[in-house]
Amino acid sequence: MPIQKQLEILVVEDSPEHIESAKIAFPGPDFNLTLAKDYFEARKLITPLLKCSPEDGNWDKFWKEYREEFEELKETGQVKSKFDVVLTDLLMPTSPTSDEDYQSGYGFPIALMAAKYGVPNIAVVTRGNHHQERIIHGLEDISGQSFEKALRGGFRRIDNSNVLFTCAPVYDHNGIWVKDWKKVYDALVTYDPKK
């Protein structure tokens, strides 16, 4: 009997209750769950190149070498992330040291970066309120104001990736409404772009 590969899943989320729900949604042995709490942590994990900053502080030299290395890998088809699925919150702080009250729509560039590096299934998910965060209007313009509407119109093909933009389905976990990451995952992996 052949051994089935664990699915590599990255969840990018800064809220502790939604991190916990991701851990519940993807237990082993079928899933290898990796968690990132901000944009920069996600970028390091998604990007297959090892260098993320110059060792000697020379940014001009670093970007020249990085571009050359990237183009060489791209030509040989080696520029690919290890992840099979990336699920990211829409709104999050820039980094753990940034003001947690200031949230940016980093879910969009994380999704585009994941598509650039060949992740086949990607979702940008929000639990936010469009009355409090204007960028959520943009997500709802793509997908509709509910998970059910997103299943009918929130999928997009970006490069060769299935990308879902959606308001989060939720469930009650010990009195707290949390994101249902498994429901988002199930929608992604069963989506057929030809239908």
Image: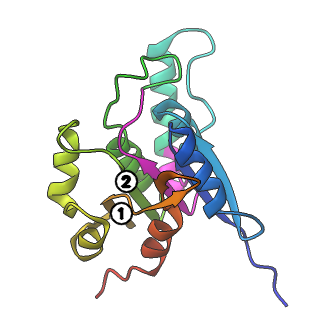
Q: Mark 2: which secondary structure?
A: strand
Where does the C terminus fall, quadrant-wise?
Answer: bottom left
Which residue extends farthest top?
57
Q: Is residue 131 magenta?
A: no
Q: Is residue 189 left or right of residue 195?
A: right
Q: Residue at x 56, y 21 (%)?
A: 53
Q: Is residue 20 above or below residue 99?
A: below
Q: Is residue 46 above or below residue 25?
A: above
Q: Is residue 13 left or right of residue 93?
A: right
Q: Amino acid at mark 2?
A: Val
Q: Residue at x 39, y 63 (%)?
A: 169
Q: Mark 1: which secondary structure?
A: strand
x and y percentages locating residue 89 in the rendered image: 42, 46
Q: Residue at x 43, y 22 (%)?
A: 100
Residues 115 and 180: in front is 180
The mark found on residue 124 in the picture is 2
Q: Which residue is mark 1?
A: 163
Q: Which residues are magenta?
A: 72-93
